[in-house]
Structure formats: C-alpha cells, structure tokens
Amino acid sequence: MKAKTRKAVDATNDERILTMFEERNEQALRETSGRYGALCRSVARNILGTEEDAEECLNDALLGAWNAIPPAHPNNFGAYFLTLVRNFALKKYAAAHAEKRGGGQMPAALSEISEIIASPENVEHEIDRRAVLDAVPR
C-alpha cells in the first residue's frame, strides 16, 4: 500500500473512532486500544520502566479521551492520543521521583528563621536574668 493510500485509510479509521467517541459508543475505547495501544504502551514503558505503569497510563489516556471528546475533535487523533499517554506517563514519572517534604530544604529553612522564632524565655525571665548578672560582682 502506498504512503498516500495508507494515510487516507488511517484518517478514515481515526474519523470512525472519533465518531464513536462523539456518539458515546464504548467500542471507541476498544478500537483506540487496538489501534494505538502497543505504540502507547511502548512510549509509556520507555518513560516509566514498567509494563504495569504503562498499562495504567494507557487506561488514563482512554478515560481522558472519553471525557474530552466531544467537545474536542482533534485533527490527528493518533498524535492526540499518543500525546495524552505521554503526558500521563511524564506526570506519573514526576510524581514517583519527586523529592519528599521539600527535598531536604526543611533544615535550611528552619535555620534561616531560627533567629526570629520566639524564644521559650519571656521578657520577665530576661529582666530577672540581667538583674542577677548585674548584682553579682565581677
């Protein structure tokens, strides 16, 4: 099959899938998974490293497409769907590799504000302490 013919068939198949999405036909999910699932899982697996996470991203993208179409009607459904999968994979990767609790910056932040944090001593104790120091001969 020539490249132009293949592109025309792909566009026709994508339009059919988009029509199913717009009609809220659940077959659109199966068609999308069958047509783009392997490629999308491969992209997500390359980002995340595991088949389970890749499958989860594919499922998240299917739900995302279900919720977005309609009103969205992408001109290139394959690129649109692959972008959804990639974005879910990148978001999952970022969440898995995020530094917890400020990434070790909490001690630095606490040391910066230690000078302005209220002392456990109160003013009366400080006045008494100075009075005792002044009363003791040096």
Image: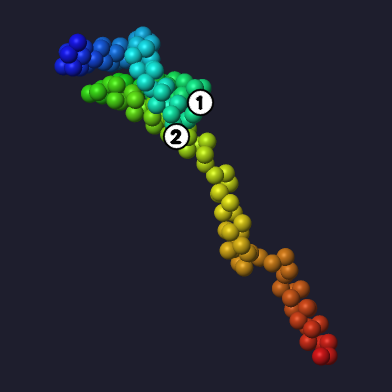
Residue type at the position of mark 1: Thr
Disc nearer the start of the sequence (2/1): 1
Q: Within 10 angstroms of label 2, few (less than 14), some, or many (20 or more) residues? A: few
> Relative to the observer, which residue lies in front, 102 or 122?
102
On the rendered structure, is 113 left or right of 58? Answer: right
Q: Residue at x 42, y 22 (%)?
A: 41
Percent x, y of residue 48? 47, 30
Name the outermost residue toward the front: 1
Q: Residue at x 38, y 22 (%)?
A: 40
Q: For the residue labelled by badge 2, is the local secondary structure a helix, a strand or a loop?
A: helix
Instruction: State whether residue 77 is above or below residue 104.
Output: above
Quickly name the residue at label 2.
Answer: 91
On the rendered structure, is 47 left or right of 117? Answer: left
> Relative to the observer, which residue lies in front, 99 or 5?
5
> Relative to the observer, which residue lies in front, 35 or 46?
46
Front disc: 2 or 1:
1
Q: For the residue labelled by badge 1, is the local secondary structure a helix, a strand or a loop?
A: loop
Percent x, y of residue 135? 82, 87
Percent x, y of residue 112? 58, 63
Instruction: State whether residue 81 is above or below residue 26.
Output: below
What count of labels does the image hold? 2
Residue 137 falls in which quadrant of the image?
A: bottom right
Quickly name the residue at label 1.
Answer: 50
Q: Residue at x 61, y 56 (%)?
A: 107
Residue 133 falls in which quadrant of the image?
A: bottom right
Q: Which mark is drawn over residue 133?
A: none
Instruction: State whether residue 136 is above or below residue 84.
Output: below
Residue type at the position of mark 2: Lys
Instruction: State whether residue 32 is above or below residue 79.
Output: above
Percent x, y of residue 14? 26, 15
